[in-house]
Amino acid sequence: MTAQLRWKFIFVLVVLVVCIYGVFGLPDFPTSVAQLKDNVSKRINLGLDLKGGSHLVLQVQVEQAIGQRCDEAIDDLTKQLHDKNISFTEIRRVDDTHILVRDVTDVSSFRDLVTNQFPDWTMTPAAGENSGYLLAMKPSVVADLRTSTMNQTLETITRRINALGLTEPTVAFTGRNDDEILVQLPGVGDPAAAKQVIQAGGQLQLVRVAQGPFSSEAEALAQNGGVLPAGSIILPGRNESLTQGSNNGTVYYIVDRIPIVTGQDLRSATASPGTDMAGGYQVNFTLSTAAAARFGPFTEQQAAIGGRMAVVLDKQIYEVATIQSRIEDSGRITGGFSQESAQNLALVLRAGALPASVKYIEERTVGPSLGADSIREGVRASVGSLIVVMIFLVIYYRLSGVNAVVALILNLVILVAFMAYVGAVLTLPGIAGVILTIGMGVDSNVLVFERIREELRNGKVPAPAVDTGFDRAFLTIIDTHVTTVVSAIFLFIFGTGPVRGFAITLVIGLIANVFTSIYVSRAIFDYHLSRMGRQEQLSI
């Protein structure tokens, strides 16, 4: 054996050892078959169809986001009309995309305001109104808002699900309707916790408290002559320390409509044990630099007059605090949280708020027994196809067929080991990709062996025939594999979970196949040729 050939076998042996470690790990000695199976199950991530788990289809209420944009426009328009002294009697939302403004006095200034400051809206005279105008959101704006709402919802749900630590979940558009999202959670038999985190709003706001507490909304309105001050709203308080003396367990505050800080200004949020006498857990948060630049001067001003600030989550007041000094970039939310609820709240705040609520239109649980059946049948199919292929190769190509069998087995070992190392998910379509890889491996060996046979028929001796056979088959093998890999990459980019699983196993298997059918098989041939006599015939 030459030094070059010896190094080739050392390299192949190193690859084999690394692959075996990737699949089985470093077992304790003495070990058992059961322990080896347990090691494999821990290192190979199974998809929903093999492991069981939860399958959810969510419908995003996109109209809510459009309606919220309409409400924001009403607030902004009302403020600007007051600032410019343009009188009107009523401004209200007709539906999600239309705003009615009645009895406008200065029509010219109103038209200029809408044209310059509200480019997303078109203005037309309102039917049946002498000085009334109807503002309609442009269709292009509605379409862009629908798209951005769906994309933001998908990204937010993905961040929340990934933060739960679930193994390779699938979050993608269903492709059926433009407002549906598919969520698959392998290994999660009870998706209640995931659903709670998915659906949580997480809309954090820090707002100035103007008045309160009041025992009811009616009392809050009566305190102001039945009309709320401009730019303010009434919100309920849910912290137990705020409900003492109230009749229904809830108190109400009048707060500014426009918050000083929102959840979008958060830089981080973490849960920790509470530092006050109430105990429990609290959520600590830090603000971005831009938010801190606004928050610092505001709190400094409020501290001088003993102002109060409310921590609002999803239109519910969690805490009201008197500002005693300047606060720069951090704060905390208390309220007797349990450890789990505090961690979930911190997770939701970090992931961001959903732009619209979601509704579950499909929910089912895949039992692990069904997955076990799929694994068993898939393994049987893979092993059966491999055995049939092995028998054919040995019968048709004699000892050279044994060479191909060794390359095929190593190909499968590399495939499984790579999936274990990178944490790829094995699905039922992925098993189909494994079987297809076996077929591609056979195809590569057939190309090489038939080329070698052709050179032998032309009168060449075994060594040159092997060299020519590998050299001329190499470009064909690379060409076929590259085109298939490109197709698999497109499947991965545009496909959902199961399709991606098929694409991943196919790509890994094809790359491994090039290595085994060209490098490993050639090394075995070279070793065999080095031990043959000059007149001995190659068994092919």
Image (cartoon, helix red, strand yellow):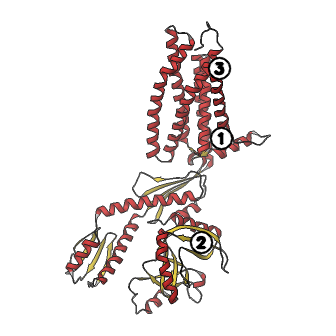
Q: What's the residue type where badge 1 is placed?
A: Gly
Q: Residue at x 62, y 48 (%)?
A: 368
Q: From the image, which quarter does the N terminus lie in? A: top right
Q: What's the residue type where badge 3 is placed?
A: Thr
Using the image, tell me which numbered label, if any, was put on residue 283.
Answer: 2
Residue 375 in percent (x, y) is at 61, 41
Residue at label 3?
2
Tell me how far mark 1 sits from mark 3, CA to CA: 30 Å
Front-most of residues 483 and 388: 483
- Residue 100 seen anywhere in this rendered image of the structure: yes
Front-most of residues 446 and 322: 322
Tell me how far mark 2 sits from mark 3, CA to CA: 67 Å
- Residue 215 seen anywhere in this rendered image of the structure: no
Q: Residue at x 57, y 17 (%)?
A: 397
**Callout 1 crowding tier (Cα within 10 Å): few <14, some 14–19, many ≥20:** many
Residue 18 in percent (x, y) is at 66, 37
- Which residue is situated farthest in the front direction here? 3
Residue at label 1?
22
Q: Earlier in the sequence, mark 1 or mark 2?
A: 1
Residue 475 in percent (x, y) is at 46, 25
Residue 28 placement, left or right of 434: right
